[in-house]
Image (cartoon, helix red, strand yellow):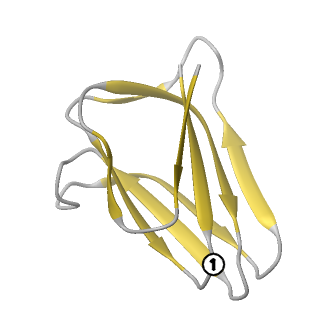
Amino acid sequence: MITIKSSTTEEVFTSKANIAAVLLVGGTANSSVALNDSVSGSGDDKIKLKALAYTSESIVFPKDRPIVFDTAIYSTIAGSGAEVYIYLD
């Protein structure tokens, strides 16, 4: 399993990937993350999470049904000090 950590809006993976789980760690403000299947953030969001300040939210997909990103993974993150962990299958 590959783990990707990000705290900025950016392309976090540059090729096809299967996402097994996502963890959003809220910073000092309410936080959110949207993951979409593109290199520039222009695609449709496939996964969205929100977390209150100083809390975390996660989603784990069934082992036999990860979320497939065909092009790339672009992460749009908001909230002061927020971090997202993306676990690839």
Left or right of 89: which side holds 57? right
Residue placed furthest toward the top: 64
Residue 11 at x, y percent in the picture: 29, 52
Residue 76 falls in image quadrant: bottom left
User: Looking at the image, which residue is at 82% across and 70% down?
Assistant: 55
Left or right of 55: which side holds 66? left
Looking at the rendered structure, the kind of residue marked 1 is Gly
User: Looking at the image, which residue is at 27% across and 44% down?
Assistant: 37
SS of the residue under disc 1: loop
Residue placed furthest toward the right: 55
- Quarter that holds the N terminus: top right
Residue 56 at x, y percent in the picture: 78, 63
Q: Residues within 10 Å of mark 1 (few under 14, many from 20)?
A: some
Q: How many marks?
A: 1
Residue 25 at x, y percent in the picture: 71, 63
Residue 31 at x, y percent in the picture: 62, 77
User: Looking at the image, which residue is at 62% across and 72% down?
Assistant: 82
Left or right of 83: which side holds 45? left
